[in-house]
Image: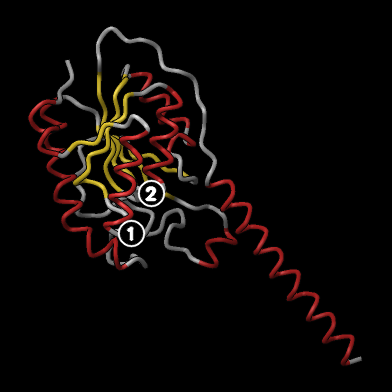
Amino acid sequence: MIKKILLALLGLVVFIVLFFGANVLFFTQGAKKISRGTPIPEYQEKRSALLVIDIQGCTTGEISLDETFQLQSEELITTTNQIIKSCRVKNIPVIYIRSELRNPFLNMINNTMATGSEGAALDERLMIVSDYNLTKNRKDAFCNPELDRILSEKSISKLFFTGLDAAHCVNSTIQAAQNRGYSTLAVRDALISETPAMKDSMMTEFSERGVGVITSDKFYAEESNP
């Protein structure tokens, strides 16, 4: 009898491990998918928008589990806020994008990105100048169709990228934007990655893929919408 109970418990443990493992694997593979989208039309006027990616409680805030992001957060947010101020003056839409997980099994492992949690909210130090506050459940922010809709509605053809991680969510969203035909520019001093070496590597890769790599100074001096 005891042997049967132990075997049943062992079977249950194995099932739970496999179930959680399958969920993690499914999420990990799905999170890497890059959307193709529909090519944007040729607009008469060239209009720009700023994407602020994953500057939120679970990444740069006090509850972040990543110390390297926390250490870089003050400089990142200060620079990003200056760019956001400039966008407000120059009539450039600012679109905030943040990661949010609704999968109850993954949230049991780590709930810092769970819907409605402090970690899923934008970092409280971030300047908010628009109502464009979109969520994503993959690295590619275009997985939320609202992003395509907003950009199309405003006839946007050029996108500036700030936030994190340059090697992951920013990179995936840039790839998806290029698939759609957007002109893409990475604001180097308003992007972070796990290490300076990784960030430098991504800036080189961006340039090789036709992504413009600029500093915030150039953005302040030149960029504006009609």
Residue 148 image point, x, y percent: 42, 26
Residue 218 image point, x, y percent: 12, 33
Left or right: residue 29 versus residue 150 is: right
Looking at the picture, which amino acid does disc 2 mark? Ala
Which of the pair 185/83 is nearer the observer? 185
Q: Which residue shows up at 58% across the image and 46% down it? A: 30
Is label 2 in a helix, a strand or a loop? Answer: loop
> Up-down: is 89 above or below 27?
above
Disc number for residue 194: 1
Is label 1 in a helix, a strand or a loop? Answer: loop
Q: Quadrant of residue 135?
A: top left
- Disc 1 crowd rating (10 Å Cα; few below 14, some 14-19, many 20+) is some
Residue 136 image point, x, y percent: 45, 43
Q: Which residue shows up at 27% across the image and 52% down it? A: 192
Furthest residue toward right: 1
Which part of the image, by quadrant, shows the C terminus?
A: top left
| Residues marked 2 and 1 touching at CB (< 8 Å) | yes
Cα gap from disc 2 to disc 1, whole angstroms: 8 Å
What residue does disc 2 label? 167
Which of the pair 198/91 is nearer the observer? 198
> Up-down: is 15 above or below 119?
below
Q: Quadrant of residue 20?
A: bottom right
